[in-house]
Amino acid sequence: MTSILAEKSTDNKKVLNQHETLFHRHPANPILTGKDWPYSMNSVFNAGATLLPDGTTLLLCRVEDRRGLSHLCVARSVNGVDGWQIDREPTLLPDVERYPEELWGIEDPRITYVPELKQYAIAYTSYSRGGPGVSLALTKDFRDFERLGVIMSPDDKDAALLPRRINGLWALIHRPMTPLGAHIWISYSPDLRHWGNHKLMLEARRGAWWDANKIGMSPPPIETPRGWLMIYHGVRRTPSSSIYRLGLALFDLEQPDKCLIRGDSWMFAPEAEYERHGDVQDVVFPCGYTVASDGDTINLYYGAADSSIALAHGSIRGLLTWLDANGHSEHAHDRRQRHG
Ligand code: BMA
């Protein structure tokens, strides 16, 4: 990990306002744009990601058409960087006849491989007349999909299934909007269809914080020996627009609503031109990652300014070390919120 300012200083001395670079942007960024697409569309962004058994990287990309409605399209690459084979036609289109909640499109898929089912579970946003809700689909091959329909009614999004049951129940992380704000919740189900036992997992902070008022899980959480490591986005509203930045939090493995540590500052933010300017300015929005064979290197795929897909790599160990140095237990945070 390098410190940007330490790099610049001649004697390499640590300076006070240094910050660490946890994710390094790939020099080929953005790695996928609308120009790469084999059919007419507006933009491509916010892709779910997974590694197939043969090592191929698969991205399930959100493609927005020229009406403004989104569908999903698969892109495959041997090295996860270039040489993308993009499906010639949309892979998963809204099916409004049977799933009217998909009326205004399907967006922002998060992929989880579920060993017990030997299938991939895709949690995605279905944009209904009543607002965005969470839908679930299962697939073995990203060609045929079994839809389970809406599992969290609007207004709810930013969802992913955990890869295994917790105490016998499936667990879904999601972000319902409530009158108290946009916070991250976790819910449980015996059968992936009926959901309950809803628990608040992580609250948006308040006031001037970078993650005040509106947060959401970004890619599915990363399972580490120390807990579920979550990359989440915080939305800072400014007088002119919003800034989507990324932070980190760690949750108990067997009781995932229990937050162990939450980072104070953001750790990744729009800086590059393709992140700052596009259809929606100042957005970095990862929906997926792959982990390299060393078990530590994480390749984060993120939508940039709602206009392209970019890649950055980091180290899972590095993220945990940063969290130890730059985070607090939620207990301490609650105390500060009350008194601060
Ligand atoms: C969020 C989601 C994302 C989008 C982001 C910025 O609410 O809808 O799909 O990338 O806004 O527009």
Image (cartoon, rainbow, N blue to C red):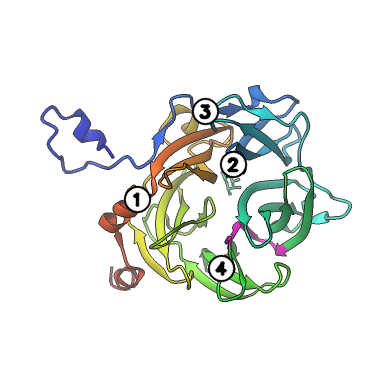
CB of residue at label 1: within 8 Å of ligand 1?
Answer: no
Relative depth, front residue between 42 and 6: 6
CB of residue at label 2: within 8 Å of ligand 1?
Answer: yes
The Cα atoms of the two marked residues, 4 and 1, are separated by 25 Å
**Secondary structure at numbered mark 4:** strand
**Which mark lies nearer to you, 1 or 3?**
1
Residue on which disc 1 sits:
317
The Cα atoms of the two marked residues, 1 and 2, are separated by 25 Å
The x, y position of residue 61, in whole percent, is 65, 39
Highlighted magenta segment, given as a residue range? 151-163
Residue on which disc 3 sits:
30
Residue on which disc 4 sits:
186
Is 243 situated above or below 339?
Answer: above
Q: Is residue 161 magenta?
A: yes
Q: Quadrant of the N terminus?
A: top left
**Residue at 36% across, 56% down:** 208
In the rendered structure, which amino acid carries the disc numbered 1?
Answer: Arg
Q: Is residue 15 left or right of residue 142?
A: left
Q: Quadrant of the C terminus?
A: bottom left
Q: Residues within 10 Å of mark 4 (few under 14, many from 20)?
A: many
In the rendered structure, which amino acid carries the disc numbered 2?
Answer: Asn
Residue on which disc 2 sits:
46
